[in-house]
Image (cartoon, helix red, strand yellow):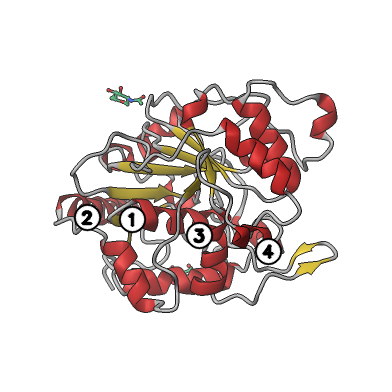
Amino acid sequence: MMDFLFARLCLALQLVHENVLRVLEGRCRPRRSREKLLVLFPSASGAVQPFLWKDQPLPDRLLLYPPPFGFKGLKGKVENLLTLLPAANPDVGPEEASEKCRRCVVVGNGGVLKGLELGQHIDRFHTIIRLNSGPLGKHTGDVGNRTSIRMSYPEGTPLHWADTDPHSVFVAVIYKGVDLSWISAMIRKLGVSFWDWFFFWQRVPREIPLDPSRFRLLNPDVIRQTALDFLKYPKPRWRLWGWDQNVPTLGMTALSLASLLCDEVSLAGFGYNLSQQGAPLHYYDNLPMRLMQQEKMHNVDKETQFLHRLVREGVISDLTGGIHCSFCSS
Ligand SMILES: *[C@@H]1O[C@H](CO)[C@@H](O)[C@H](O)[C@H]1NC(C)=O
Ligand SMILES: *[C@@H]1O[C@H](CO)[C@@H](O)[C@H](O)[C@H]1NC(C)=O
């Protein structure tokens, strides 16, 4: 029995590795993921700026909705923050401009990554986007050791910064007004006072040891487009206890961002299978999948359907097969 299970496990590992190599070694076509996405969603605007910069005025459009869809009521605060950020960088990605076709991978934090030993392959992608505190350290064998972009909000950011990649940039995602104060404090190396912690639902880091030129502010239009144009959620509505399941998860937002920055987009570590209640939720801890059923802010089913469609239609590839396993044998 053990031998049988072991053989099946080896076969699964081999299929996953072959699939990743096919993606890495196949032809890279410029702008492919974005163009295919816009074919499926023709009403979506093609030109969304991924980030906001010091030398570009804040568009009025961004003052229509409160965070995370805009900066309504926060004009002064955002404009102050913009002065701390770098000036527009035509090469919006984390690394030097290059003629090379950019293959990117968004590394989700899903338990499906555990034990797949994809680290070396993940590190071969041009741009590697990691989410929240998704750790490296003893997990590098599974998830790699490079980080081009770490994308997060205050409560999700690692308390102790552990990325050693000299090319890393930090992309701040703003969910509430106080997040703007926090990111300003991080860029100015002011720390966060004890009193400020009061406004967060979980401890937040006191420093991010990156040069100010390595901070980016995500344009809320990216989240708005993801919610309205791609997921077809209704116009943002605020409920007494927060947003009504119409806020895309950070992973969905990262996918949208990747479609703007990269030529070909892959996902790894995505997909929650809610019928596997005891399966690990994350690659780095022992929380069970069933916790996902308590999710109130995000609409996990809707996102899963959307991602499934993108993988099926070849807009993106799913390296670990948790969304749609094109390489699994039947
Ligand atoms: C990742 O690991 C490789 C191989 O051990 C090493 O050469 C490289 O410097 C590491 N990169 C980072 C960013 O830690
Ligand atoms: C989820 O898990 C169940 C039970 O193991 C399985 O039958 C189903 O195919 C899985 N769904 C996906 C999308 O992988």
Q: Are marks 2 and 4 in contact (CB under 8 Å)?
A: no
Picture quarter containing residue 95?
Answer: top left
Q: Are marks 1 and 2 in contact (CB under 8 Å)?
A: yes
The residue lying toward the viewer, choosing from 41 and 103, is: 41
Identified by mark 1, the residue type is: Ser
Sequence-wise first label, 4 or 3: 4
Residue displayed at 77% across by 67% down: 238
Sequence-wise first label, 1 or 4: 4
Q: Which residue is mark 3?
A: 252
Sequence-wise first label, 1 or 2: 2
Residue 301 appears in the figure? yes
Is label 1 or label 4 in front? 4
Q: Which residue is mark 4?
A: 64
Identified by mark 2, the residue type is: Val
Q: In the image, 261: left or right of 243?
A: left
Q: Which residue is mark 1?
A: 266
Binning the other alpha carbons within 10 Å of mark 2 as few (below 14), some (14 to 19) or many (20 upward) gives some
Identified by mark 4, the residue type is: Leu
Binning the other alpha carbons within 10 Å of mark 1 as few (below 14), some (14 to 19) or many (20 upward) gives many
